[in-house]
Image: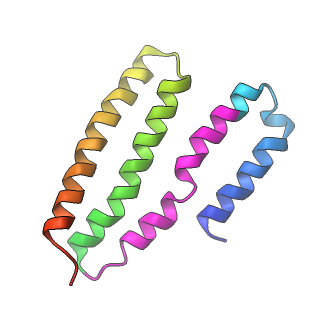
Amino acid sequence: MSRFAQTAAFLSILGSSPVWADSSDTQQMQKDYMAPMAGMGDAMHQGVMSKDPDVAFAQGMLPHHQGAVDMAKVELKYGKDPEMRKLAETIIAAQEAEIKQLKAWLQAHPQK
């Protein structure tokens, strides 16, 4: 079963399980955290399939970093703790800069 299928199955359980049913806000928050992870594993796997180890690294890291940005944005949407919110802001800034660097490097080093 692919990671996407596993995540989809988990999300379907999440919506109906009494364990998660303490509030609709909690259910939505959990779904929002799961969404970035839904395809990240498959995208990372696809990225590392290059024969060039440097390209594989760059392509594999892109979805990983984007997932971190997306999860940090969920923290900013729901989180209350100042330390965690600050960490989320730091993660967004750092990961977005690295995404830009990875994309620029890939553009300058096209696969053969």
Residue 62, x across and y down, in percent: 34, 57
Above or below: residue 31 compared with residue 76: below
Q: Nearer the viewer, residue 47 or 81?
A: 47
In terms of image quadrants, where is residue 16?
Answer: top right
Q: Nearer the viewer, residue 46 or 100?
A: 100
Q: Is residue 95 left or right of residue 40?
A: left
Furthest-left residue in this view: 108
The part of the chain drawn in magenta is 28-51
Q: The N terminus is located in which quarter?
A: bottom right
Residue 46, x across and y down, in percent: 43, 72
Above or below: residue 9 compared with residue 22: below
Residue at image point 48% right, 39% down: 71
Residue 56 inside the magenta-drawn segment? no
In terms of image quadrants, where is residue 9?
Answer: bottom right
Residue 41 inside the magenta-drawn segment? yes
Residue at image point 49% right, 58% down: 40
Residue at image point 23% right, 43% down: 97
Q: How many marks?
A: 0
In terms of image quadrants, where is residue 63?
Answer: bottom left
Above or below: residue 95 compared with residue 105: above
Q: The C terminus is located in which quarter?
A: bottom left
Residue 15, x across and y down, in percent: 79, 42
Q: Is residue 49 left or right of residue 93?
A: right
Residue at image point 23% right, 57% down: 102
Q: How is the image coloured?
A: rainbow
Residue 99, x across and y down, in percent: 27, 50
Q: Is residue 21 left or right of residue 59?
A: right
Magenta portion: prevailing SS class: helix
